[in-house]
Amino acid sequence: MKYKFAISGAADIGMCDVNAPQKAEEVGREVVRHNGILITGATSGIPDFAAKGAKEEGGIVLGLSPASSYQHHIKTYRLPIGCCDTVIFTGFGYSGRNLLLTKAADAVIVICGGFGTLNEFTIALEDDKPIGVLTGSGGTAEEISNLLMNVKDPHNHGAGKVVFSNDPKELIEKLVKLIEREQKELKTPPPIGE
């Protein structure tokens, strides 16, 4: 079974570091190089750049749209569809889509981002998912370390499962190790295909 990596990042890259789009593409390529499937919110910006990189590497990209149909996705939300192999139209708006996006993933990757990205991060944190943060990408990605240090958390959410790197390859390698560690804890780990 292939690992599923959700990309969480800014649709509007104006808040991102100038190198964030290229790094997002490289993250997409690294996901595929590490036997992964990329899951996006079927949106523009950072997720679309990551999807482009994954497709260039010959990978599979699944999009989860906030819209209820193809027409709704294009006409109302005005979102792209080109880099996804298939899109699931959730009909749940952004907040419902964010929940499904993180729940569907084995790991979540944060690149730049705003409040939507922060929402996806906190869902993944609450669900104890492995999370990778691409530092140096701008936006929310630059605030997560401070949040983890400064927000009192008696439940110790995400302990040992949030990793940081400014290098896409290193970030994906760290996440793969976390996923593999979790799978080894199972009595019958799922098969890993090619």
Image (cartoon, rainbow, N blue to C red):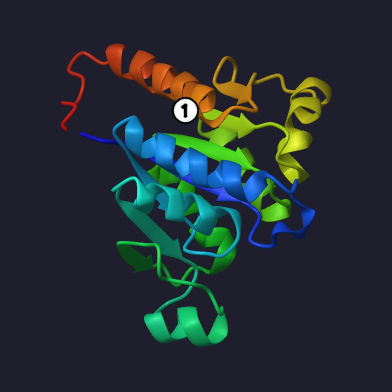
Q: Which quadrant of the figure contains the N terminus? A: top left
- Residue under the point 73% across and 34% down: 136
Of 10 and 102, nearer the camera is: 10
Amino acid under disc 1: Ile
- Image x and y of residue 171, in percent: 53, 26
- Residue under the point 79% across and 20% down: 149
157 sits left or right of 104 in the view:
right
Q: Which quadrant of the figure contains the C terminus? A: top left
Please, is residue 114 above or below residue 111 in the view? Answer: below
Of 52 and 161, nearer the camera is: 52
Q: Which residue is mark 1?
A: 172
Q: Is residue 79 visible?
A: yes
Label 1 neighbour load within 10 Å: few <14, some 14-19, many 20+? many
Quarter of the image for residue 68 reads bottom left
192 sits left or right of 175 in the view:
left
5 sits left or right of 164 in the view:
left
Query: Callout 1: helix, strand or loop?
Result: helix
Quarter of the image for residue 142 reads top right
